[in-house]
Each structure stands twice: as structure tokens, then as C-alpha cells.
Image (tube, grey):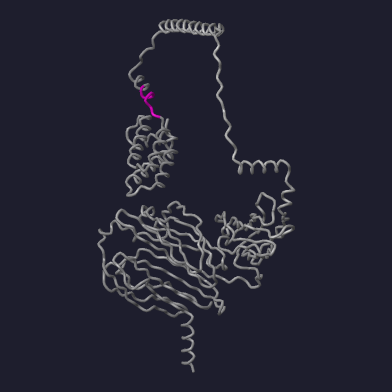
């Protein structure tokens, strides 16, 4: 009986602990990364992990990266606490052929668990010199989602980061492709790259590439696919992918109204007429149904105009003004309907009933129907209600559009010649000539007086050679703002060689203002006269200029940041 109980206890305990070690594929090329995934799943609250994962012998690989995450969820089927620990190791093979990967060991409740060993096949190992231009093996994408326990159609924020030992490789990541899958809707928040964090994971520099929202449209465990990007070099363009993330999507609570479809967030609905003319029977008019708020606005089903025998409604034209918010996509969606009243008199245009689920309050909100009350006129009533001016304008417009008006004949008017002599014109011309002559005489007299005054002024002494050289230098001094504008034009036109050559001229011009020959002398001069902080900023700027100048690829964003630093610093130290 004791043996039977011990056997059953071991079987039950074994079922509560699941440990696995898998590779992403069985065969790898020489430039492929071997990704090992270790998954430990503990079912229950009485299980305690006493040791870390004990890895097998990985001496035939180079470990180039690792990461781990822990998820704790409650299984809705068994109401059991499930703790899942996932670790991922990125390996670079050192030789080709079949390589055996041993077992991973872990101790839980004084019992050792291990995985089954397996083999991977490495086809070819490419020489490192041949891979000098292939930087994809040194660049890694990581997708991070903090909130993984959400409701159906509720958004969660995903952050895409890139890691690399070489900081210059971070600028080569382009063509980001967000995940696409039937059970999720993805909307970008921004693709603005952040500042480079030099102390990222594992002391590898990192940078945020993109932020996006994920809306799962079904309940259960939903896996967000990997994000892909490309790493461009001079000779090739390689594709890299990120990790996948698993979400726990809860079903929406019971008790939803019958009109509820899939709207999750906080919304308002309104309906109004945008036609300028009075509503007329058998004439089309434009009615807009506007849904505004924040949530899964781009993906939800909009309330339509309900059918009625009083009017005829056609398929709407949808326009939207949506931007990312804090709890979803916010803005408004306009559905512009063409509605034709079938009769004259009072008409009520109603929308369908609309309800949404508010995840913040965890309750359903039923907005009901929105109604637009109109009074449609008949054609005779429209004509009778027009004023006299409106009738005249309409009659005139119809006349001009339908009747061909003749072209009126015009004649040119000619001024008859007169034989009488005009003495007034002659005297006026003579007076003008006399005025011009007197003005000329006054101008000549003023010139003679000015010449005499110039001759009586004593000549200015020439001064010393140093003073003359200083005056010449001041007269030949270039405005530093001209350099800034010229550098901006060179950056926009992509003329990077001229950009750095002009930058050297600018630095030489500023150093000549203080009569300093070299960069080190000028830095010491700034330390004594401008302060240590300015001198340190000058030294950092010179190093940054050299990094950008000799970088394999100059990016417009890097030059934009460099130019801002140049303008700020040289504006402070220039005379």
C-alpha cells in the first residue's frame, strides 16, 4: 500500500511540474542564431523553485544574449494558480555538424527535474571576415508588453526595442513591420526612435523603435506574432525578428445588452443634418452619425441609421479623425448618410441601439437610440416659402442658363482734334525745365562745399602694424550665423563631405577669433575663460563630430542632432 501511495504521489507531483527545453528549429546555417527556450510551468501554490536553471555544457557555442520573464495566471477551467517561467538564450555556433545539447536541471520541493537532451545540425560556419558587413547577427529585437491580462477588445501597449553591442548598428534598423493576425488588431502609436540607452540589457546599448497598441478580438490565450525589421549594410539587407508574447484575454462579463456588439471603451453617439437647404420630400439630404470617445474606436461596429418607411437610406461614407490615447484610440468617426424622405411632414430619423463595455468601471453602458426630428416640406411648400428676392434670383439664373443672350455691339470713341493752341501746357513745361535747372545748380554748389570740408579735415594716423592687422581681421570676419544656415542646407541636400569640411572651417574661424591654433589649446583657453563645463562640452562635441564624420553611414537624424549641438555651443563661445 505504501508503494502504491508513493507511486500515485510521484505521478501527481510530476503532472504539476512541466519543464521543457526546445530550439526554434533543428537545422541552422552558419550565420543563424540558435535560440533555446526553457519553459517551467508550476501548477499550484505549494510548489517552490529552490535552484536556478542549471544549463548544460554550451562550450561549443558563444552565448550572445539571454532573457527571462515570469507569468502568473489562474486557469479558469481548474481554478488553479499557474506560474510560468520562460527563459531564452541566443547562441552562436562555433563549428558545423551535429551538436548535442544536454539537459537543463532545476530543483523543486527537494526534487530534481530535467529535460531531455537533443541534437541540432549546423550546416556551415562562415568565416568571421566574410561576415564583416553582415551586422544582423549582432542586432536583436525585443517586444515588451507589460499588461498581459486584459479583456477582449481592450488595448495593451507594446514597446519594440533593439539591442546591439555596436551602437552604430542601431541606426541601420529600418522597415519595421508590425504583427498581423486574425485574432488581434494592431494600431501604431508612434515610430519615433528614442535616445540610445548605453546601459541596456546585459550592458548592450538599446533604443526604442516603435510603440503600438494591440487589441485582441477573442478570449483565451492569444499569442502576439513577432515584429520584423531589416538591418541594412553596404552589401546586403538582412531580416531580423523579435520574440512572441502570449496574452491572457478574459471574456467580457455576462449581462451584456442585446444591442451590444464589440465596443469597448467610453463613447458618445450623436446624429445631425448637415444639409443647408430645407428638408424636402423626394430630395436627398446629408445626415451624419458621429461616434466619439476612446477605446477600440477604429475596429468596433458603428451604429447605423435604422430602416423606416418614412425615408430611404443609402450606404454611408466613413471618415475618421483618430489618434492614440491613454486607454485606446481616441477621436471621432463620422458616417455621412444620404437620406431621401418619402413623404412630407414630421419625420424621425433614428439610429440603431448602441451599447459599450467600460473596462475602467467593468460595466456595460446602454446609450439607446439617437433621434433626429425633421419636418420635410413638399415642393410646392418650398416654392411658397421663398422670398421675392430668392424667386428673382432663381428666375435670373434660369434665364442666364437657358436663354442665349446676343453680344452687344460696341464702338470706340475718338477724341476730335482741336486747332486751338494751349498756352497753359507750354508755360507748365517751361516751369518744369527751370525747376530742374535750379536743382542742378544747387546740387553742384553742395558738392563744392563738401569737397572743401573734406580737404580741411586732418588725415588719420595709420597706427601700428598690429592695429592695422586687427582692423583687417575685423573687416574680414564672417558672421557665424551664415555658417549655421549653410550647414543646414548641406544637411538637407545630403552633401555630407562638404558638411564636415564647412564644420572644420567654422571651428577654425571661432579659434582664430581667440587667436588659438589647435583644438587642445582652445579647450584649455575655454577652461580658463569660459568655465570647465563649456570646455567639457567643446571636447565632447569634437568627439561626436569625429564619430559622425567617420561613421559608415551618415543619417539625417544624427546630423540633425549634431547640428543643434553645434549651434548651441558655438553661439555661446563665439565673439
Q: Is residue 98 left or right of residue 12?
A: left
Q: Which residue lies most toward the bottom here?
A: 1
Can residue 70 be seen at all in this image of the molecule? Answer: no
Question: Which residue is depicted at the point 70% across and 51% down?
Answer: 278
Question: For residue 177, which quarter of the picture?
Answer: bottom left
**Location of residue 514 in the rendering, given as x and y in whole percent from the top left corner:** 38, 30
Tell whether 158 sits left or right of 340.
left
Q: How many marks?
A: 0
Q: Residue at x 35, y 78 (%)?
A: 117
> Does residue 543 appear in the picture of this structure?
yes
In the rendered view of the protein, which quadrant contains the C terminus? Answer: top left
Q: Is residue 475 above or below residue 485?
A: above
Q: Quadrant of residue 549?
A: top left
Q: Is residue 563 above or below residue 200?
A: above
Left or right, residue 184 beside residue 475: right
Looking at the picture, tell me which residue is in the foreground, 314 or 331.
314
Q: Nearer the viewer, residue 365 or 200?
A: 365
> Where is 171 relative to 75, above or below?
above
Q: Position of residue 13 (x, y in %)?
A: 48, 83
Query: Magenta stretch: dominant SS?
Result: helix
Q: Is residue 436 magenta?
A: no
494 and 200: which is toward the camera: 494
In the displayed structure, 567 sits above or below 26; it is: above
Q: Which residues are magenta?
A: 472-478
Residue 518, image x, y percentages: 32, 35
In x, y percent, where is residue 129?
25, 58
Amino acid at each position: 500500500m505504501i508503494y502504491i501511495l508513493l507511486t500515485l504521489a510521484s505521478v501527481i507531483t510530476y503532472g504539476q511540474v512541466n519543464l521543457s527545453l526546445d530550439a526554434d528549429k533543428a537545422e541552422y546555417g552558419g550565420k543563424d542564431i540558435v535560440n533555446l527556450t526553457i519553459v517551467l510551468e508550476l501548477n499550484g501554490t505549494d510548489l517552490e523553485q529552490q535552484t536556478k536553471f542549471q544549463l548544460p555544457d554550451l562550450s561549443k557555442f558563444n552565448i550572445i544574449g539571454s532573457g527571462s520573464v515570469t507569468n502568473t495566471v489562474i486557469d479558469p477551467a481548474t481554478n488553479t494558480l499557474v506560474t510560468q517561467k520562460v527563459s531564452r538564450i541566443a547562441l552562436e555556433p562555433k563549428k558545423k555538424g551535429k551538436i548535442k545539447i544536454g539537459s537543463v536541471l532545476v530543483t523543486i520541493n527537494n526534487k530534481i527535474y530535467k529535460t531531455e537532451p537533443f541534437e541540432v545540425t549546423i550546416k556551415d560556419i562562415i568565416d568571421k571576415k566574410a561576415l564583416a558587413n553582415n551586422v544582423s547577427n549582432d542586432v536583436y529585437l525585443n517586444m515588451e508588453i507589460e499588461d498581459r491580462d486584459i479583456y477582449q477588445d481592450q488595448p495593451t501597449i507594446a514597446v519594440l526595442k533593439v539591442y546591439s553591442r555596436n551602437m552604430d548598428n542601431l541606426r541601420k534598423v529600418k522597415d519595421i513591420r508590425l504583427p498581423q493576425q486574425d485574432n488581434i488588431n494592431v494600431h501604431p502609436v508612434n515610430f519615433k526612435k528614442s535616445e540610445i540607452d548605453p546601459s541596456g540589457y546585459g550592458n548592450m546599448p538599446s533604443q526604442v523603435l516603435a510603440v503600438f497598441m494591440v487589441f485582441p478580438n477573442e478570449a483565451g490565450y492569444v499569442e502576439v506574432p513577432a515584429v520584423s525589421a531589416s538591418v541594412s549594410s553596404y552589401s546586403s539587407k538582412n531580416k531580423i525578428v523579435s520574440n512572441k508574447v502570449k496574452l491572457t484575454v478574459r471574456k467580457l462579463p455576462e449581462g451584456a445588452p442585446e444591442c451590444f456588439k464589440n465596443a469597448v471603451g467610453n463613447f458618445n453617439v450623436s446624429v445631425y443634418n448637415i444639409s443647408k437647404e430645407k428638408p424636402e420630400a423626394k430630395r436627398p439630404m446629408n445626415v451624419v452619425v458621429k461616434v466619439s470617445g476612446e477605446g477600440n474606436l477604429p475596429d468596433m461596429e458603428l451604429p447605423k441609421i435604422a430602416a423606416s418607411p418614412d425615408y430611404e437610406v443609402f450606404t454611408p461614407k466613413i471618415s475618421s479623425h483618430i489618434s492614440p490615447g491613454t486607454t485606446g484610440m481616441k477621436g471621432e468617426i463620422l458616417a455621412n448618410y444620404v437620406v431621401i424622405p418619402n413623404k412630407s411632414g414630421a419625420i424621425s430619423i433614428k439610429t440603431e441601439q448602441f451599447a459599450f463595455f467600460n473596462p475602467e468601471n467593468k460595466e456595460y453602458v446602454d446609450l439607446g437610440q439617437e433621434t433626429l426630428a425633421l419636418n420635410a416640406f413638399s415642393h410646392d411648400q418650398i416654392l411658397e416659402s421663398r422670398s421675392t428676392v430668392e424667386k428673382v434670383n432663381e428666375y435670373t439664373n434660369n434665364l442666364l442658363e437657358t436663354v442665349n443672350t446676343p453680344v452687344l455691339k460696341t464702338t470706340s470713341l475718338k477724341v476730335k482734334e482741336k486747332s486751338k493752341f494751349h498756352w497753359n501746357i507750354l508755360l507748365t513745361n517751361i516751369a518744369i525745365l527751370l525747376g530742374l535747372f535750379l536743382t542742378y545748380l544747387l546740387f553742384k554748389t553742395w558738392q563744392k562745399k563738401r569737397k572743401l570740408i573734406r580737404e580741411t579735415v586732418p588725415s588719420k594716423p595709420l597706427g601700428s602694424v598690429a592695429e592695422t592687422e586687427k582692423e583687417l581681421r575685423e573687416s574680414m570676419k564672417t558672421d557665424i550665423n551664415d555658417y549655421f544656415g549653410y550647414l543646414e542646407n548641406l544637411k538637407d541636400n545630403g552633401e555630407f563631405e562638404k558638411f564636415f569640411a564647412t564644420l572644420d572651417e567654422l571651428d577654425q574661424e571661432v579659434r582664430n577669433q581667440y587667436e588659438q591654433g589647435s583644438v587642445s589649446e582652445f579647450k584649455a583657453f575655454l577652461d580658463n575663460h569660459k568655465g570647465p563645463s563649456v570646455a567639457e562640452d567643446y571636447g565632447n562635441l569634437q568627439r561626436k563630430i569625429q564619430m559622425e564624420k567617420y561613421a559608415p553611414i551618415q543619417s539625417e537624424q544624427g546630423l540633425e542632432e549634431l547640428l543643434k549641438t553645434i549651434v548651441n555651443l558655438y553661439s555661446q563661445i563665439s565673439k
